Image (spheres, helix red, strand yellow):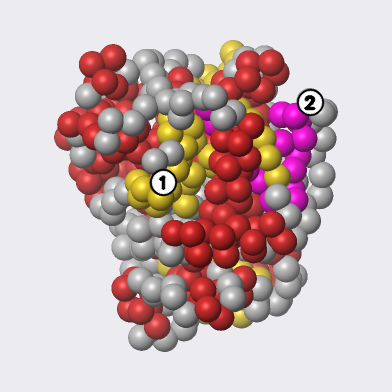
């Protein structure tokens, strides 16, 4: 498997290089040179396979032997060790639950696979890998729990003090081992600025092998294709076809993976890009121009992105053909009021609690199905996080009905371990240098 930069297709790198560097120097995004189609008989018989079996076939098809079968199987069995069930709400509406991993969000698929692939490529005796991440909540938890206990890696996570939810903070700060959390007395942007500066610091790069666990890393995108195949597998068992996926979107990695899955041969009738008030992409899909904007804060805050970093990848997948994109991908955006109403509606109709991100995907699916009443379809909206991660948005009645998963209850027993720093770069750098070699 070779990859090119979306900004320069003649610049090709190995999978390994794309995994460790995340981004090409030219600020494009890495894309596979070849995206082979899976055999028809595999696609038609998805229903015969389990999630790890599907994951292996799909990954092997893309990686083309870069990681030998036995090793790839072991990575997948270790990374994808939780289910992704499709739950039926009505004859034509299903919810794909992606929140059964350790951080209770779909980002576990990407983070767990990426961490294991990185560890695999680190040869015996090589310099420890230093992962630096700034998080506003969800990414950090997935990365921390994804790398926890992975040999030869040390993860440093920066999060804004008082600005992540209690469960997110538990996931960031109770790990120990090779994970350390720094509570920054500032905003998410401050955290991000510190990390960015560290990545271009010559002295730090000399001393450490730094990497970002960035959401645009190709090794996070690949495992996100697995659950689209596995969802179709489950629907095949129910005799359902003409699948329409509604994806709550922020940086557009998740829906990008769905489009990649389709490119590999997965039959999908339509994709729906569902956003909150950060509607850069729906505006474009509905005939407007593509105009990135500063993000605005909403209650579905993991999707507060005004300039989606994976969009260039999606354009590239469609060879920049705008009419092809707008045919296959429909866009809708909803405000906080509508999101709260949708949470209440799903609760009262189906006795089911959705997180605010998931509620937006539900709204978008309804809107699309209403606009296409003649079309036979099986609608699936993606549930990207467990509702317990966002306790503030629910009415007391609904909040009382949210079951706290086992993973969280276990964390509550553990002490918080976080170092505290301000927003100045000099102290952050001194911290990194002083703490050198303290990992297990
Ligand atoms: C990250 C995230 C999203 C957005 O996913 P993208 O791949 O960035 O589009 C949606 N919902 C939740 C809960 C998330 O954590």
State how many labels appear: 2
Residue, disc 2: 287
Q: Report whether 138 appears left or right of 322.
A: left
Whole-percent x, y for residue 172 in the image:
49, 70
Foreground of the two, 236 or 171: 236
Residue, disc 1: 90
Whole-percent x, y for residue 170 in the image:
47, 76
Please say whether residue 432 is one of the residues in the magenta stretch.
Answer: no
Please say whether residue 272 is one of the residues in the magenta stretch.
Answer: yes
Neighbour tally class for label 2: few under 14, some 14-19, many 20 plus, Cα within 10 Å: few
Secondary structure at numbered mark 2: loop
Q: Is 37 rendered above or below residue 438?
A: above
First reached walking from the N terminus: tag 2 or tag 1: 1
* Residues in magenta, as a range: 270-286
The picture quadrant where one finds residue 228 is top left
Q: CA distance from mark 2 to mark 1?
A: 32 Å
Give the mark toward the camera: 2 or 1: 1
């Amino acid at each position: 498997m070779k990859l090119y930069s979306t900004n320069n297709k003649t610049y090709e790198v190995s999978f390994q290089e794309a995994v460790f560097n995340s981004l090409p120097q030219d600020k494009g995004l890495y894309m596979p040179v070849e995206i082979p189609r899976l055999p028809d008989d595999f696609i038609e018989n998805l229903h015969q396979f389990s999630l790890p079996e599907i994951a292996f076939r799909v990954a092997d098809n893309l990686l083309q032997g870069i990681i030998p079968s036995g090793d790839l199987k072991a990575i997948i069995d270790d990374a994808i060790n939780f289910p992704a069930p499709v739950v039926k709400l009505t004859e034509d509406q299903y919810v794909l639950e992606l929140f059964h991993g350790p951080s209770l969000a779909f980002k576990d698929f990407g983070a767990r696979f990426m961490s294991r692939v990185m560890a695999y490529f680190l040869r015996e005796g090589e310099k420890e890998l230093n992962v630096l991440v700034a998080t506003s909540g969800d990414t950090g938890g997935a990365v921390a729990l994804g790398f926890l206990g992975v040999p030869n890696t040390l993860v440093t996570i920066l999060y804004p003090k008082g600005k992540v939810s209690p469960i997110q903070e538990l996931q960031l700060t109770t790990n120990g081992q090779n994970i350390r959390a720094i509570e920054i007395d500032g905003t998410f942007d401050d955290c991000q600025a510190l990390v960015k500066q560290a990545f271009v610091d010559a002295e730090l790069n000399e001393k450490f092998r730094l990497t970002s666990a960035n959401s645009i890393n190709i090794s996070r995108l690949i495992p996100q294709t697995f659950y689209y195949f596995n969802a179709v597998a489950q629907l095949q068992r129910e005799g359902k076809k003409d699948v329409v996926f509604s994806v709550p979107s922020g940086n557009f990695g998740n829906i990008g993976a769905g489009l990649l899955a389709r490119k590999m041969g997965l039959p999908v009738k339509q994709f729906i890009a569902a956003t909150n008030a950060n509607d850069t992409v729906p505006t474009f899909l509905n005939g407007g121009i593509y105009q990135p904007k500063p993000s605005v804060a909403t209650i579905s805050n993991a999707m507060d992105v005004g300039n989606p970093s994976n969009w260039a990848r999606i354009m590239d997948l469609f060879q920049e053909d705008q009419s092809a994109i707008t045919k296959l991908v429909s866009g809708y955006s909803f405000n906080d009021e509508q999101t709260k109403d949708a949470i209440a509606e799903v609760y009262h109709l189906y006795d089911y609690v959705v997180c605010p991100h998931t509620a937006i995907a539900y709204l978008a699916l309804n809107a699309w199905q209403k606009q296409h009443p003649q079309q036979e379809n099986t609608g699936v909206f993606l549930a990207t996080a467990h509702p317990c991660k966002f306790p503030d948005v629910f009415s007391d009645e609904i909040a009382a009905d949210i079951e706290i998963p086992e993973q969280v209850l276990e964390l509550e027993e553990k002490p918080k371990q976080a170092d505290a720093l301000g927003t100045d770069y000099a102290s952050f750098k001194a911290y990194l240098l002083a703490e050198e070699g303290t990992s297990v």
